[in-house]
Structures are given as structure tokens and as C-alpha cells.
Amino acid sequence: MSPTRPILREILAKSTRYLTEKNVDSPRLSAELVIAHALGLNRLDLFLDLDKPLSESELARIRPILARRGTGEPMAYILGRREFYGLDFHVTPEVLIPRPDTELGVELVLKLFDPGQTFCFADVGTGSGALCAILLKLFPQARAVATDISFGALNVATGNLRRHGVDQRCVRTRGDLLRHVKGRSLDLIVANLPYIGEKEAESLSKEVVGFEPHLALFGGLEGDELFPPLLWDAQEVLVNGGVVLLEVGTNQAKNLCDRIAGMSPRWTDIAIHRDLAGHERYAQARLRW
Ligand SMILES: C[S@@+](CC[C@H](N)C(=O)[O-])C[C@H]1O[C@@H](n2cnc3c(N)ncnc32)[C@H](O)[C@@H]1O
């Protein structure tokens, strides 16, 4: 007699227990995603088939993926994808996994420009290119420069910009902030640069600090070291009336806005934007000539 095969419901419960013991974030959801991915199903199919017996080859597909998740490797790297603002983006360990926080940046740009407007923007520290690609999708007349200091990140961004059909309107360049961009041509600079302080590293989840690129996470000891040099660069490349929109970390916005005001009287309309939870997320300023 052949041994009874375990059913999906049992494997789901067992996998959840395993991930709980490994202290993985969201163990039940992770188990569902791991199993669905291994079996080539979506999560809904999984729930419709909970009494399905699993074959040895199906179990063999689940085990290595579950083991990866058990080390704390983020689901997005295992799946190779993450959704941002309703579109799917390829992600690898060379790029930060796009966060919902950054979607506020998209909303803020939608308040600054009309959908049919022609303008040119830079996405500094583009990473996966998600923010840049979404903006090019939402503004079909816009053109962009996507920059990053990491070659690996720029490759991922290029793939994503192509995948969403917007690469023809975007120049990709590797470099430090905007130092390599010449001419006064930008109407907008958006940047989600690294802003976590190195001294905070120990308080970060191991799923973040152990797997995401440190170049994408840390902005010096305090976290805010890249903002001043970016603003100096911005003064050289923004048109009259051009705007910078910077994603910031907790408690950085006020200090950053004071610094912008102190840099030059040409910076005007300096503002802080909060997310729905009331956290300060973006600093904005406009350059006037
Ligand atoms: C926090 S990640 C953001 C990625 C992407 N914009 C997003 O929102 O998902 C920061 C990115 O900035 C890049 N970066 C770090 N230092 C930089 C620098 N000095 N100049 C340009 N890019 C930099 C990193 O390689 C990383 O891709």
C-alpha cells in the first residue's frame, strides 16, 4: 500500500510553524506565498484546493524555497518581483525592494504637473526604476534621467523601464548624485536616497539589513548625509521654478527643510509632506532665479 500523501492544508500549517520557529516576518502569509510560488498557483487557487494531496515532486519544489524564506530572505527576492503603484517590477538583491511609502512621492508629483504636461525630471538613486517608470507611465509627455551609483541597480532599472515601455523616454546614467548631469534642464528632481543612519543598523530587521543592499539603505552615520550634496547639485541643474522632492526618514524633514532655507534664499515654497499615518515622508522645495 502506498503511504498517504499529505494534503495542502497540512503542508501549509507545517510550513507556517517552521517559519514561525525561524522568526520570519508574517509566517502564515509567507508560507502561502512560498507554496503558491512553488506549485505555480496564485494565493486564491491555494485556498480553493486545500484538500489536494501533494506529490513527492511538489513537496520537493516547496522545500528549498521554504528553506530560503526560513533564512529571512525577503519574499520579493524569492519571487523576483514586487508590485509598486499597481505595476509589477523585477527585483534582485542589487536593488531595494520598492516600499509603499514611496507611492506618496507619485501622489505629490501628480499635484505638481498635469498628466499631459511636457517636463523633464531626474530620479536620483533610481534602484529598481519603479518610481521613474510609474512617473513616465502617468506623464506620457515627460522625459527622465534615471541615475544610480550602482551598475547592478541601473541594469535592473533598465529592464523594468523596458518592460513597461517607457525606456525610450529615459536616459540611464551611473554616477554620484547629479554631479555628472550637465546643463540646466530639469523641472523636477525626485529622490529616494538612502537615509537610514549606520548607527541604527542594529535596530533594523534582519530581513532588511541582512539582504537588502547597504548602498541603498545607509546614508552615513546619521542617515542624512546625501541630502546637502544633492541640493548643491540641484542648484546647478534645476530650471527656474524647478522642484526637488526628497523622501526622508523619521524626524529628518524639519532639519532638512531648515538646511535648505539656510543654503540660499533662492529656495522657496519649502514644505513637509506627511503620509496617511501622519509620518513626515517628503521634503519639497522650489528653486527661483
Ligand atoms: C533607498 S534606495 C531607493 C531605490 C528606489 N528609488 C526606490 O524608491 O525603490 C536608494 C538608491 O540610491 C542609490 N544611491 C546610493 N548612494 C548614491 C549616490 N551617491 N548617488 C546616486 N545613487 C545613490 C542606491 O544604489 C539605491 O539604488
Image (tube, rainbow, N blue to C red):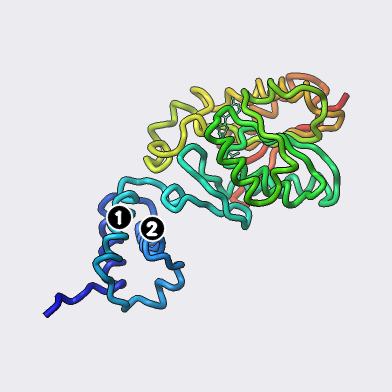
Q: Earlier in the sequence, mark 1 or mark 2?
A: 1
Tell me whether the residue at label 1 lies in contact with that at label 2, contact meaning CB atoms closer than 8 angstroms. yes
Residue under pointer 2: 30
Q: Residue at x 78, y 34 (%)?
A: 243
Q: Residue at x 31, y 55 (%)?
A: 66
Q: Amino acid at mark 1?
A: Leu
Query: Can you say whether 121 is above or below 138 in the image?
Result: above
Left or right relative to 107: residue 72: left
Q: What percent of the width, then of the height, locates residue 235? A: 77, 22
Q: Which image quadrant for residue 19?
A: bottom left
- Secondary structure of residue under mark 1: helix
Q: Residue at x 45, y 38 (%)?
A: 212
Which residue, given by chain and number where applicable, does mark 1 sit on? 19
Residue 123: percent from left, percent from top: 68, 36
Three-letter amino acid code at disc 2? Ser
Q: What crowding class fits label 2: few (fewer than 14 Cα within 10 Å), some (14-19), or many (20 or more)?
A: many
Query: What is the distance, in whole Å, between disc 1 and disc 2 at their CAs?
Result: 8 Å
| Numbered badge on residue 105 | none
Q: For the C terminus, which image quadrant?
A: top right
| Among the 4 quarters of the image, the one containing residue 50 | bottom left
Where residue 238 appears, as percent x and y from the top left, is 80, 28
Q: Is residue 221 left or right of residue 85?
A: left
Whether 87 is drawn above or below 183: the answer is below
| Residue in the image at 43% along x and 40% along y | 208
Asked if 164 appears above or below 92 in the picture, the reply is below
Q: Secondary structure at mark 2?
A: helix
Q: Give 62 or 253, whichever is nearer the viewer.
A: 62
- Nearest the eye: 102 or 161: 161
